[in-house]
Image: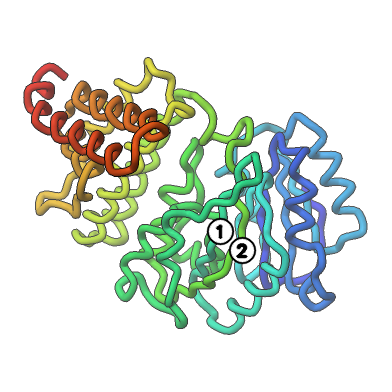
Amino acid sequence: MVTESTRTPFLSFVVPVYGVESYLYQCLESILGGLSDEESDSVELIAVDDASPDRCGEMLTSYAAGRRNVRVVRLTENVGLGLARNAGLAVARGRYVWFVDSDDWLPPASVPAVLQQLRRDEPDLLLLDHLRVHENGRLEVDASSHLLRGVPEPVSLAERPQLLRLQHTAWNKVVRRDFLDELELRFHPGWYEDIPFSHPLLIGAKRISVLDRVCYRYRQGRLGAITSTRSGRHFDAFTQYERLFAWMDRHAPDPQLRAELFTLMISHYLVVVGNDDRLHPHLRRPFFRRVAEHYRRFVPEEGYPQPEGVPGLKHRLIGRDAYLAYVALRRAHRMAGRLRGTLGAADTAETTGAAASEVAGQSTALAGRR
């Protein structure tokens, strides 16, 4: 069921909602609160109740009452983040669409800034900066945020290839609605649904605009978030990357882009396999095995830009399917972390470097033992 409005907005917000009653009002108000009448007339908020088991459905009913720019889509069964976004997108009428997660929020004045940039540049894709917000209130700049600096005019990925390394999420991108149809892009089911959605946007866009401003607050460590949930569903990442490379084969068979995406894929897998908050210890070895399988399946024949230092060593261990060597390297890093409180930075770096060198020397022998 969808509550209807006769307006034609310029920007549609699609907000999937599930199990976030503690955060929902902050999210909704961060989008619509404080807008001028003209700005309010330019936007619509489509909240998708993904059969939320808490009070979110009631909260959406109350919030939508009397607000002609709020529409509610109610799903009869839980379908997950990606398919819930699709349900909202199906009824979105704005020229542009911004996917916002309901446990996150926008800083003040973000919406007017985005509207101004969209109208000025008329891009296929607008990229935004964000901050990670931890449960204790600590703010953290994302490692990829520096890539947004110094892009005053719309560009293509060919002109700014480093933009492909921007965090691959849907919420740091505002997309022209028709552009999604041109690329035949929708979200797939499963976790890590942003992988086969976000990268194609950058590859296919002819006009990429960059707003070098923090327009999104990304909540970290929330109970129930996939990045802090131990589950076998993290294996969904393999299917999502398979979908990405299948899209590449159909739409952008570019060897250089494929090599860059391969590097990003292996680095992403290493983040997952090394994170205790995502994988149970008994799942780490089979996950590593699947990573090695994808390495062999997708590694470009002409090579790829392998990282330097310890990250590059991890890539080589993946290529050899050398799980025991990887475990040894991981333990060395953790030991260095524990020593950091008692040793100076130089001593810690020396300890880590020595451990990495030792692991590198042993990796060939360990690879044979797996």
**Which of the two labelled residues, at mark 2 and mark 1, occupies the earlier sequence position?**
1
Left or right: where 35 falls relative to 251 = right
Q: Quadrant of the image for the C terminus?
A: top left
Question: Tag on residue 256?
Answer: none
- Name the element at disc 1: strand
Q: Nearer the viewer, residue 331 or 220?
A: 331
Residue found at x 68% / y 59%: 106
Colouring scheme applied when the structure was drawn: rainbow
Residue found at x 31% / y 49%: 264
Q: Nearer the viewer, residue 149 or 345?
A: 345
Residue found at x 70% / y 42%: 17
User: What residue would you read off at disc 2?
Assistant: 215
Image height check: is 45 above or below 83? below
Left or right: where 308 falls relative to 26 = left
User: What residue would you read off at disc 1?
Assistant: 130
The image quarter containing residue 298 is: top left
The image quarter containing residue 279 is: top left
Distance Cα–Cα, label 2 vs label 1:
6 Å
| Residue 74 image point, x, y percent | 75, 42
* Residue type (three-letter) at the residue carrying disc 1: His
Q: Nearer the viewer, residue 305 or 70?
A: 305
- Label 1 crowd bin: few (<14), some (14–19), many (20+), radius 10 Å: many
- Name the element at disc 2: strand
| Residue 148 image point, x, y percent | 45, 68
Say whether marks 2 and 1 touch (CB < 8 Å). Answer: yes
* Residue type (three-letter) at the residue carrying disc 2: Cys
| Residue 145 image point, x, y percent | 46, 61
